[in-house]
Image: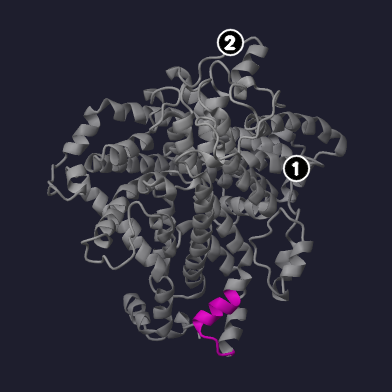
Amino acid sequence: MASVAGTREAGPPSRARLWLSRFGEHETWTAYLFILPWVIGFVALTAGPMIFSLYYSFTDYGVQQLAGIEPTKTVGFDNYRELLNDPKIATSLKNTLIFTVMTVPAKMCVALGLALILARLAFAAGFFRTVFYLPDITPPVAIGIMILVLFNGSTGIVNRALEFIGIPGPFWTTDPQWIKPALAIMSIWTVGGTMVIYLAALKGVPAHLYEAAAIDGAGPWRRFFNITLPMISPALFFTFIVLTIAGLQVFTEVYTAFFGAGSTGAESPDAALMNVVYLFRQAFEFFNIGFASAMAWLLFAIIMAVTAVQFLVSRRYVFYQGDSR
Amino acid sequence: MSAGAQENLPTGGAGTLTPRVPPADVGRVVSRGRGGEGPRFGWLKSVPFVILLGFISILALYPFIWLISASMKPQGEVFDNKLIPDNWQWNYTGDPTTVPGDEKLFNLPDLPVLTWVWNSVWIGLLAAVVVALSSSIVAFAFAYFRFPGRNILFALILATMMLPGAVTMIPVYLIWNELTKLTTEGGALAFLPDIGVNTQYPLWVPNLFGSAFYIFLLRQFFLGIPRDLFEAARIDGDNYFSMFRRIAFPLAKPALIVVIIFELQAKWFDLITPLIYLRDTALYTLPLGLKTILDQQGAGGGGEGRWEIIMAGTVITVLPMVILFAIFQRFFIEGIATQGRKG
């Protein structure tokens, strides 16, 4: 049944012709029927909205337009100029960047350390894997609340523990200097998923490589740097990208702990103002849709740029087993 | 064919998400398990490492224990950092006719916590089942059929996985806002039920269209099913859809469970969508409800607020996930590990 393209090689019609001709086939149309849900979703919930978003970023769309009272006016690059003038944009970008830089390498190192030990343990590895994964299934809202109670300056257990070893702890949740470290430490707590990915990667390293290295007299450090690291580099790279993208979009924990209608702790400190938090407030608290759309595109551009740089840099270091991709 | 054998196979390793299919594929099944590992410690050498990890475990588990014990304390003792409360107090349920300011979690005035739990449960389950069905149909098409445009479209799916949600968040809201105008009084589609902003539809309807990551995951799974199985079904006279329904879908059970669990978790975690769309407290899901409790009861940050209620609310948000994890641990771990393998 599978229409075999290969059998038609005899007469050489152009490849485009061949490609088009397959639209005449029953199988092609069935396939398109099957993927129709995704196609509709892609048009209605991804591609379409992206185009709209781009359009709105050049308009003054706001509360009036949302309610249908006033028509939408295009304002050229005003929203983008406003991005440069609004000092909170720079603040939120800086905060988000600092948070990402604090969390991503730390999470990767902690996860790798744990995974390396777990992969070698003779017993209890399954137990520890479960324990270290548990923080990852904690809802982010709950994590936001944990930040408030565990890092509370006067009563939190973190400062109690620091006191115990003779260090006076800072007021994590109110001191602008210490809010991001508190958020970062809590984020590092949820390292289990990354660890599981590394663990799976470590199990995929063929044992014969280690045997060969041992015969050649390579010590544990040489084996680590020359076998383990290159062999799991795709997993390292994958988590590097994913954690960075997630870090640049951090929202729920931060919003829960420091923003919203309530009077929780500090009053919406600038030091915790993250990119997506500010975007959310502009769009859905102040309904500056046009401006927020411009913010969204700025964020998109930043994430794409960072990811592109990561891809370029990693090309030298990531080793794919088997095929060269 | 596989359900029975599956239980006997070691978990961990490259397991659940490799389709387990009839004898044709014995080689793959055998090569699973603990194969290909680096040097391992002996029992004796493991001991110091186990002790080290034991200490780290305390860091991982402490917040949970703190939380549960704090939720069992009377107001004012929540922050005493004692793991075993001096005075025990049940903060979850109580007499509804109690003095104002002393209500328990499930009878807080104007905060229908039990409704939120129910909302989170049914929306999560519905969203998860819907996304598993839609994604698996799409994934099957990408795995089985060879059609023009397949590679381009699949690359597009992979690309959307990288897309930051913040970009589409606002325009998607505007679409729902338009739907609200259409379906409420005076709108052109007023005969339809009220869908749009301040309804729960935006929380699960997008799942009807599949989700990029799940499509990717399920396609990988379907690719592992030998093509002969499908061709045999074709010869038996199955059409494409019954081939999917009778062969691909049942075989994909492990992968479908992973999808359902991941989506349940995603819905259980999601704060921003309900925050954008829901206004009436009766419609809230648990994360938004918990945030509301925090905002209302947490005044003062340290001493004043009713933090024992907030802690109880946090416990009922955390605990269902822990239970789900306890039951389906294998699928959680396999799903995460598979994510890494796509690198």
Which residue is nearer to you in this view: B91 or B226? Answer: B91
Provide the chain ID for the residue under circle 2.
A
Please name the residue that numbered disc 1 is placed on. Answer: A127
Residue at left offset 62%, top offset 80%: B229
The disc at residue A168 is 2
Colour approach in the figure: one colour
Amino acid at dot 1: Phe
Residue B247 colored in magenta in the image: yes
Around disc 2, counting alpha carbons within 10 Å, would you say few (fewer than 14), some (14 to 19), or many (20 or more)? Answer: few
Instruction: List x then y, in percent, for residue A4.
Output: 48, 82
Count of marks placed on residues: 2
Where residue A11 sits: x, y (%)? 38, 86
Q: Secondary structure at mark 2?
A: loop
The residue that appears at 62% across and 74% down in the rendered structure is: B226
Q: Main secondary structure of the magenta part?
A: helix
Q: Is residue A174 magenta?
A: no
Q: Chain of mark 1?
A: A
Left or right: where does residue A287 sit relative to residue A207? left
- Pointer 1 local density, CA inside 10 Å: few below 14, some 14–19, many at least 20: few
| Amino acid type, label 2 | Pro
Which residues are the magenta region?
B236-248
